[in-house]
Image (spheres, rainbow, N blue to C red):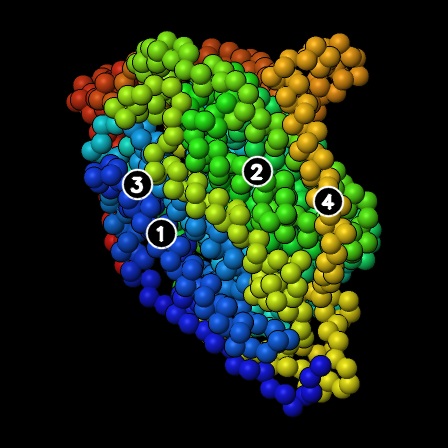
């Protein structure tokens, strides 16, 4: 079984995700990009699990999906609160943490 | 009777049967197109929805034709093998999960119904939701909804079945809450979702149990996994399964069906689901979603047959639930003022009939009732929508805004009357043939008590439908139907338009509304009504038992033949499997399926009996129906038109009646039980326990740790910090300050810059790792 294609796709997804995290100003889109990164990792896990014929990778992928769901829940909660307080979710306006 | 030498005839097949998997795939693709490009299309995506459903309908029709040919190409007794095609879907650690289609009579008949009703509902919606703000999304969800049901119907394995099932749950949530700006609508959507989810747990548990229980047997004997529905069916009838295991699995599966098909005690979500747009109610209540539960039982029938020992006892879980549902839902329909809620409870009650039929071994009548009920119930719902759209100004209140509409809406009125008579089970209409068959067979199979319940239900159905018809179409026009307050209402709607009132949004009729007051709806609404009414009138003749065996076409086409078969070639991916007869069978051949374990070969369907038709029994039930209609008509006239003093306000004067009325108005207090008692009982202690744990345990640990560390830090402060560290810190502080000045721009507060730094650091680390490892 060739895993190359999976790895290429995964790398592509990862890059898109990284681009999204860095370049996007909208907090929700950044959260979505993080999801892409996580799923790129998932794809890798599953691809290698397929090659090795073991279920470990699938198990990991399931865990990651569950944790990603929790992460998005927390993230969206933050975004919602930020929006309530400031009426914006643009990340550029959230620079109070500068040193 | 046949000898060993007699060979099975080769069954014909065809393109439509082999490629039936396209039927759900086309709407699924349509959904994707609508959701991504719908808003840019000239008709906002509705044309894609309509086209994809129509394509499905054509394919389903072709499949039905070829299935009939296939049945006719075999002998009279021969088991007609379903057209199976499977593909590897995914594998995990050497286990292969397949996905595929299995087309048999049951699948074909439901496919045709679902595709047909979906097409009509889509056509209807193009008019009904004209100008709605989420028009495109509506069509996307509607298309996916139908795709989910179609996928479930063709499923060869329980995994695809589960998938279609869950897609429907999701889409029903989206569609019921379509006008979510109104809090009541989004609450109804959530209620529907969570109530159905409660049942869905049963499906998951049941599927898993069946897999683990049957996998070894199916792999050894049929070469399929324990997810394959035909594998499970054969296993259930093989005499192999442990009776406890299969009983628990059937209970779990039936709980799922209770949730989905709105059976008692989880029926509470169905009437609330009326919050969605009327086309959704129509689709949801006639052919998709609620029928899914009944379909599940019909599809995995051998499991329930063995698990509940159907035909072996005078009552089981399914018949009890079905019987209770028939009566309690019909009783609730009497106290509703909302026309859609009357129809909703009527659906619940009719689903009870289907379940009762399945539970009592009347498989074919129950499936036939799915078929006929879909037409007349869709027609009734679309008729209610037509009234609210064109006559009562978006009100569904029969007492306030309807009455006397038969003069204004001749087409809606005629179709409504035909469908009502079909629902009541009056002789030449379709409901008579299916409902009477169920009641008759339930009695024939030894479930006498449930036959009486069915007859009571028929009486109640006739009565509450007469009441609703009377309130809607007869008497004097009231409220919006009489045209009064119309201008005022219009202004209300205009103002609420700006304040984003959900119902007002789909109210932009445009200029075709020049003549105010009630009028007939446009052709895109009346055409579906007429088509459905024609079918409500005629579809019963497909299995008209009263006219003799020649008329029982569905029995030949749909009912699986309970014959013992042997599988000669295992069904691999993309291959239909081949069946052969078991070897020597001497003397009079009698199918043992369902009653005993086949010695050789397998059974896919249990042997069921059919009650011989008797006109005396039919006249009894027809008499009951006419009695219900007449009584209800007289009472309605006295109560609503003449305002008879003896009847008006009776529920307030008489204590017993008041108690009964309150019980019904409050829907047996089931909602109170679920929301106030159960949810509180579960949620209350959990939050209290969490609070206690937080306050006592975690805080306690924290406090003691803090106390210890305060003492320790005091010592450290005096001895080490002041003397040793400070000297160092003061020096390093200076150094840090210098470095900080250099690095301060990095701490820009911009998250994206932090992200960039993080990822470049990770990239550098990865590079280092690669270099070290190589």
Q: Residue B394: x and y, percent?
A: 42, 22
When the figure is inspected, residue B78 is found, relative to residue B309, above or below; the finding is below
Kindly check if marks 4 and 1 are in contact, taking CB atoms under 8 A apart as contact.
no
Which residue in the protein does label 2 denote?
B420
Q: Are both tags, 3 and 1, on one chain?
A: yes
Q: Which residue is mark 3?
A: B46
Instruction: Determine which residue is flagged by label 1.
Output: B54
Q: CA distance from mark 4 to mark 2?
A: 16 Å
Seen at 24% across and 39% down, the residue is B43
Q: Residue A84: x percent and y percent?
A: 35, 15
Q: Quadrant of the N terminus of chain B?
A: bottom right
Badge 3 crowding class, 10 Å Cα cut-off, few under 14, some 14 to 19, many 20 or more, is many
Chain of the residue where label 4 is placed in the rendered structure: B
Sequence-first tag of 3 and 1: 3
**In the rendered view, does B591 fall on the left or right side of B416?**
right
Residue B679 vs B435, above or below: the answer is above
Q: Name the front one of labels 4 and 3.
A: 4
Number of residues whose C-alpha sits closer than 10 Å to that of mark 1, classed few (under 14), some (14–19) or many (20 or more): many
- Image location (x, y in percent) of residue A42: 39, 49
Q: Is residue B692 above or below residue B602?
A: above
Looking at the picture, does residue B97 appear above or below residue B655? below
Question: Mark 2 or mark 4, which is nearer the start of the sequence?
Answer: 2
Q: Callout 2 environment at 10 Å: few (<14), some (14 to 19), or many (20+)?
A: many
Name the residue located 32 percent from the left edge and 28 percent from the top edge. Answer: B132
Of labels 2 and 3, earlier in sequence is 3
Mark 1 and mark 2 on one chain: yes
Q: Residue at x 30, y 56 (%)?
A: A7
The kind of secondary structure element at disc 4 is helix
Give the number of the disc on residue B287: none
CA separation in Å, label 4 and label 3: 44 Å
Q: Which residue is mark 4?
A: B621
């Amino acid at each position: 079984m060739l895993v190359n294609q999976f790895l290429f796709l995964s790398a592509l997804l990862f890059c898109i995700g990284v681009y999204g995290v860095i370049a996007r100003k909208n907090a929700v889109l950044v959260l979505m990009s993080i999801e892409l990164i996580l799923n790129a990792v998932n794809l890798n896990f599953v691809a290698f699990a397929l090659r090795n014929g073991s279920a470990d990778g699938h198990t990991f992928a399931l865990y990651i999906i569950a944790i990603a769901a929790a992460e998005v829940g927390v993230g969206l909660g933050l975004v919602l609160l930020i929006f309530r307080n400031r009426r914006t979710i643009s990340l550029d306006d959230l620079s109070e943490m500068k040193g | 009777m046949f000898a060993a030498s007699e060979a099975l005839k080769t069954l014909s097949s065809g393109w439509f049967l082999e490629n039936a998997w396209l039927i759900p795939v086309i709407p699924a693709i349509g959904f994707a197109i609508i959701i991504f490009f719908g808003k840019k299309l000239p008709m906002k995506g509705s044309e894609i929805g309509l086209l994809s459903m129509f394509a499905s309908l054509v394919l389903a029709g072709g499949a039905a034709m070829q299935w009939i040919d296939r049945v006719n190409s075999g002998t009279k007794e021969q088991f007609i093998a379903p057209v199976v095609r499977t593909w590897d879907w995914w594998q995990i650690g050497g286990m292969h999960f397949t996905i595929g289609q299995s087309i048999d009579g049951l699948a074909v008949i439901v496919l045709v119904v679902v595709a047909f009703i979906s097409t009509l509902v889509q056509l209807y919606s193009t008019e009904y939701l004209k100008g709605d703000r989420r028009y495109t999304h509506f069509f996307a969800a509607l298309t996916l909804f139908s795709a989910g049901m179609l996928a479930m119907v063709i499923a060869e394995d329980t995994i695809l079945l589960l998938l279609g099932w869950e897609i429907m749950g999701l889409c029903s949530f989206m569609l019921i809450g379509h006008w979510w700006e109104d809090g009541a609508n989004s609450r109804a959507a959530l209620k529907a979702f969570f109530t159905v989810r409660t049942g869905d747990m049963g499906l998951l548990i049941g599927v898993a149990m069946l897999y683990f229980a049957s996998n070894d047997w199916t792999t050894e004997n049929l070469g399929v996994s324990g997810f394959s529905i035909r594998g499970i069916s054969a296993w259930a009838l093989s005499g192999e399964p442990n009776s406890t295991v299969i009983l628990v699995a059937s209970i779990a599966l039936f709980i799922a069906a209770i949730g989905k098909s709105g059976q008692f005690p989880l029926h509470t979500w169905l009437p609330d689901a009326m919050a969605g747009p009327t086309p959704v109610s129509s689709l949801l209540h006639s052919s998709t979603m609620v029928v899914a539960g009944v379909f599940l039982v019909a599809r995995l029938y051998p499991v329930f047959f063995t698990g509940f020992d159907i035909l072996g006892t005078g009552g089981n879980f399914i018949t009890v639930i079905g019987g209770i549902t028939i009566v309690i839902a019909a009783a609730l329909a009497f106290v509703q003022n909302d026309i859609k809620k009357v129809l909703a409870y009527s659906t619940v009650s009719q689903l009870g009939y289907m379940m009762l039929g399945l539970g009592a071994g009347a498989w074919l009548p129950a499936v036939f009732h799915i078929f006929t009920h879909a037409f007349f119930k869709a027609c009734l719902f679309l008729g209610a929508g037509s009234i609210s759209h064109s006559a009562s100004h978006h009100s569904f209140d029969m007492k306030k805004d309807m009455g006397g509409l038969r003069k204004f809406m001749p087409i809606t009125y005629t179709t409504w009357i035909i469908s009502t008579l079909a629902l009541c089970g009056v002789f030449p209409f379709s409901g008579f043939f299916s409902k009477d068959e169920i009641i008759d067979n339930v009695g024939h199979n030894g479930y006498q008590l449930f036959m009486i319940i069915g007859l009571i239900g028929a009486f109640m159905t006739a009565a509450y439908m007469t009441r609703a018809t009377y309130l809607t179409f007869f008497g004097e026009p009231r409220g919006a139907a009489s045209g009064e307050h119309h201008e005022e209402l219009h202004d209300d709607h205009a103002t609420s338009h700006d304040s984003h009132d959900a119902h007002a949004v789909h109210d932009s009729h445009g200029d075709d509304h020049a003549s105010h007051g009630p009028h007939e709806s446009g052709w895109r609404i009346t055409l579906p009504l007429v088509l459905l009414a024609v079918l409500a009138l005629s579809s019963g003749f497909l299995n008209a038992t009263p006219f003799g065996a020649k008329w029982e076409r569905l029995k030949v086409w749909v009912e699986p033949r309970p014959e013992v078969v042997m599988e000669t070639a295992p069904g691999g991916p993309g291959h239909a499997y081949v069946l052969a007869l078991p070897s020597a069978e001497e003397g009079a051949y009698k199918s043992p399926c369902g009653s005993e374990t086949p010695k050789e070969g397998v059974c896919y369907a249990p042997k069921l009996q059919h009650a011989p038709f008797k006109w005396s029994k039919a006249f009894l039930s027809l008499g009951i129906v006419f009695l219900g209609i007449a009584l209800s008509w007289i009472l309605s006239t006295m109560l609503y038109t003449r305002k008879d003093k003896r009847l008006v306000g009776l529920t307030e004067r008489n204590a017993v009646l008041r108690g009964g009325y309150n019980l019904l108005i409050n829907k047996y207090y089931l909602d109170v039980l679920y929301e106030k008692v159960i949810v509180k009982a579960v949620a209350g202690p959990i939050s209290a326990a969490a609070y206690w744990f937080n306050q006592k345990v975690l805080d306690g640990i924290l406090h003691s740790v803090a106390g210890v560390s305060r003492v320790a830090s005091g010592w450290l402060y005096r001895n080490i910090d002041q003397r040793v560290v400070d000297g160092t810190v003061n020096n390093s502080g200076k150094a840090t300050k210098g470095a900080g000045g250099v690095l301060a721009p990095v701490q820009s507060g911009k998250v994206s810059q932090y992200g960039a730094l993080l990822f470049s650091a990770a990239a550098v680390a990865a590079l280092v790792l690669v270099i070290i490892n190589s």
